[in-house]
């Protein structure tokens, strides 16, 4: 028996066949005037030959599904975001499909998810810590899919609503707290290089030092990957310097807990010998010994707001602001102690 099912034609396939970029095909599809006539004709001919069908040319039946997509699902903060999204969407009669576009999978992982997304016909998608590059953006436009991004990896795209936190302000507050406890040699375990939130937290740390007249020392900054192991490695490197820091600010709670273990293995006690601050306020922060001082990032609330924004887009309602940042705040606990004058 012959299988008559037609393969899904992607915008990237059209772009490849036409010898143009994905954004160029997207501009043709959207009726933009900034495309050369010959190029437009070539693209339109291929669209017809390939039998390309735009989602939205007919009125789709709502699936009642929303995709919540992470780069990685092995982080505790993912659970907090899922909780906020799920509680909000359940109240609107929508179900959540949680999946991951793995960073190590590159473009192949993205294409695989897009194919599944098209087959599932989800009503919308929430992307977490995702770089909305030209290919992904164009494909989501082709699917006519409402999208909201939480904590964007790159510079926020004003065409897509984004939800974030005041990362810079939170980092300034943490640094000022340590400075206020008479610490002057403060190590910083930075987040994954290239992420928007990582840059903002590093900039906040530097701004806090600068405001207090403390010179920035690049030897005191070690990049991590937002996980326990990178925090342990960075903490070990900082604590074995010829002149180690008296306090360490880690750009995530998981990395801060890695610093805890690095300090233990160096024979140091927290906070007697080393003060430590994290970022996130995950449940583990209050369970640590001693409980971890940290910057609270409202992860569950970010998920809730992203879900509410997406529902407005699905209903065709206007979104008041394309970029919203929720406030962070310092949660003082027992991991910081004043340094003797």
Image (cartoon, helix red, strand yellow):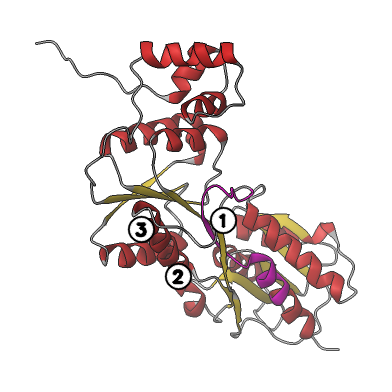
- Quadrant location, the C terminus: bottom right
Which quarter of the picture shows residue 202?
A: bottom right
The residue that label 1 is drawn on is: 229
Which is nearer the N-term, disc 2 or disc 1?
1
How far is the residue under mark 2 from the one under mark 1?
A: 28 Å
- Identify the residue position indicated by label 3 in the image: 311
Task: Judge from the rendering whether residue 159 lies leftward or rightward of residue 246; answer left or right.
Answer: left
The percent coordinates of residue 247 (x first, y second) are 74, 74
Q: Quadrant of the N terminus?
A: top left
For label 3, the SS is helix
The local crowd at label 1, few if under 14, some if 14 to 19, many if 20 or more residues have their Cα within 10 Å, is some
- The magenta-colored residue range is 155-173
As drawn, the label of residue 87 is none
Mark 1 → mark 3, Cα distance in angstroms: 38 Å
Q: CA distance from mark 2 to mark 3?
A: 15 Å
Residue 334 placed where, x, y %? 60, 85
Closer-to-camera residue (315/329): 315
Residue under label 2, please give it.
301
Q: In this rendered view, identify the residue nearer to me: 341 or 315.
A: 315
Question: What residue is drawn where x is 41% and y is 17%?
Answer: 47
Q: Nearer the viewer, residue 192 or 54?
A: 54
* Left or right of 237 on screen, residue 157: left
SS of the residue under disc 1 = helix
């Amino acid at each position: 028996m012959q299988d008559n099912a037609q393969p899904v034609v992607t915008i990237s396939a059209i772009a490849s066949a036409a010898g143009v970029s994905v954004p160029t095909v997207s501009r043709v599809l959207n009726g933009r005037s900034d495309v050369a006539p010959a190029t437009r004709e070539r693209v339109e001919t291929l669209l017809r030959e390939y039998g390309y069908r735009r989602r939205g040319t007919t009125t789709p039946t709502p699936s009642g599904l929303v995709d919540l997509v992470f780069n990685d699902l092995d982080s505790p903060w993912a659970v907090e975001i899922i909780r906020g999204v799920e509680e909000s969407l359940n109240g609107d009669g929508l179900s959540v499909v949680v999946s991951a576009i793995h960073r190590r999978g590159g473009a192949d992982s993205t294409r695989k998810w897009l194919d599944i997304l098209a087959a599932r016909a989800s009503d919308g998608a929430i992307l977490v810590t995702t770089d909305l590059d030209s290919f992904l953006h164009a494909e989501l436009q082709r699917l006519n899919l409402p999208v909201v991004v939480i904590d964007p990896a790159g510079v926020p795209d004003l065409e897509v609503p984004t939800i974030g936190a005041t990362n810079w302000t939170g980092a300034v507050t943490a640094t000022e707290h340590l400075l206020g406890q008479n610490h002057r040699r403060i190590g910083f375990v930075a987040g994954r290089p290239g992420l928007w939130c990582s840059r903002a937290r590093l900039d906040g740390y530097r701004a806090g030092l600068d405001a207090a007249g403390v010179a920035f020392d690049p030897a005191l900054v070690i990049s991590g990957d937002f996980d326990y192991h990178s925090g342990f490695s960075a903490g070990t490197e900082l604590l074995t310097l010829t002149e180690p820091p008296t306090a360490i600010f880690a750009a995530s709670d998981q990395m801060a807990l890695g610093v805890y273990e690095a300090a233990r293995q160096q024979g140091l006690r927290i906070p007697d010998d080393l003060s430590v601050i994290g970022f996130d306020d995950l449940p583990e922060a209050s369970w640590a010994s001693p409980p971890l001082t940290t910057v609270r990032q409202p992860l569950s609330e970010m998920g809730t707001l992203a879900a509410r924004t997406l529902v407005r887009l699905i209903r065709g309602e206007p979104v008041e602001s394309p970029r919203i940042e929720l406030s962070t705040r310092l949660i003082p606990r027992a991991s910081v102690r004043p340094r003797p004058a």
